Image (cartoon, rainbow, N blue to C red):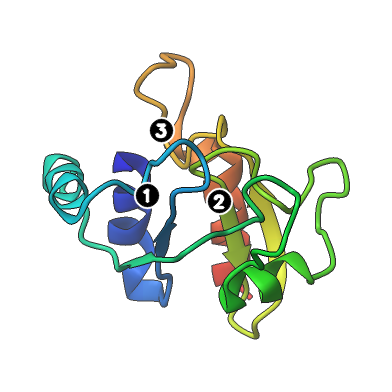
Amino acid sequence: MAGLQVLEETFAGQGFKVLGFYSNNFGNQGGSDDQIDTCTGEYMVTFPQFEIANVIDPDGAGPEAPQPVWEWLLSQPNPDPGLPLSPDWNFNKYLISRDGQLVGHWASPTYPGDDPNDPNDSFDTSPVVVAIQAELAK
């Protein structure tokens, strides 16, 4: 989450906004209110977060439908056909343009900025940062 916080702080003045959506689709990551508050405090999360019942149908057997924001997101043209739009784990990232178009998405392993676990990583070369900068320049 620290990477998302840095993105918010870096680009907020240009109209960029991070929104977090958490659910219990992937092994109860949502947790209790106290657990979420503890995590939010530990990682100094200040961007808005929204609890939703589910992002995807948890067992694929129905009838649980995605929440409206995810229903919309998953119905958009996929900007990266090599990567399914539907998340298969937590911390997927989606970039939506100022005019409401889905223009990028990244799976969980893609760190949104300067990955502290990779000494060769750079904030400026992160694919997420590069895409955000390109959108903000339009």
Q: Are marks 2 and 1 in contact (CB under 8 Å)?
A: yes
Residue underneath mark 3 = 114
Which residue is situated farthest in the right direction here?
Answer: 81
> What residue sits 50% from the left and 41% below the top?
90
Q: Nearer the viewer, residue 96 or 22?
A: 22
Amino acid at circle 1: Leu
Q: Residue at x 66, y 68 (%)?
A: 65
Q: Is 91 situated left or right of 44 in this image?
A: right
Q: Which residue is mark 2?
A: 93
Vertical placement of residue 60 versus 118, above or below: below
Q: Residue at x 41, y 77 (%)?
A: 15
Name the secondary structure under disc 3: loop
For marks 2 and 1, give the CA distance: 9 Å
x and y, in percent, of residue 100 in the image: 65, 82
Residue bearing mark 1 = 4
For the residue pair 29 and 130, the one nearer the viewer reads as 29
Do the CB atoms of the residues marked 3 and 1 lie less than 8 Å apart? no
Side of 132 where 30 appears, left or right: left
Q: Residue 125 lies in what quarter of the image?
A: top right
Q: Earlier in the sequence, mark 2 or mark 1?
A: 1
Q: Is residue 137 visible?
A: no
Query: Residues under labels 2 and 3: Cα distance?
Result: 15 Å
User: Tag 3 or tag 2, which sits nearer the N-term?
Assistant: 2
Crowding around mark 2 (Cα neighbors within 10 Å: few <14, some 14 to 19, many 20+) is: many
| Distance (Cα) linking label 3 and label 1 | 10 Å
Helix, strand or loop at mark 1 = helix
Q: Secondary structure at mark 2?
A: strand
Q: Is residue 15 visible?
A: yes
Rendered view: 90 above or below 13: above
The C terminus is located in which quarter? bottom right
Q: Position of residue 95 (x, y in %)?
A: 60, 62
Image quadrant containing the N terminus: top left
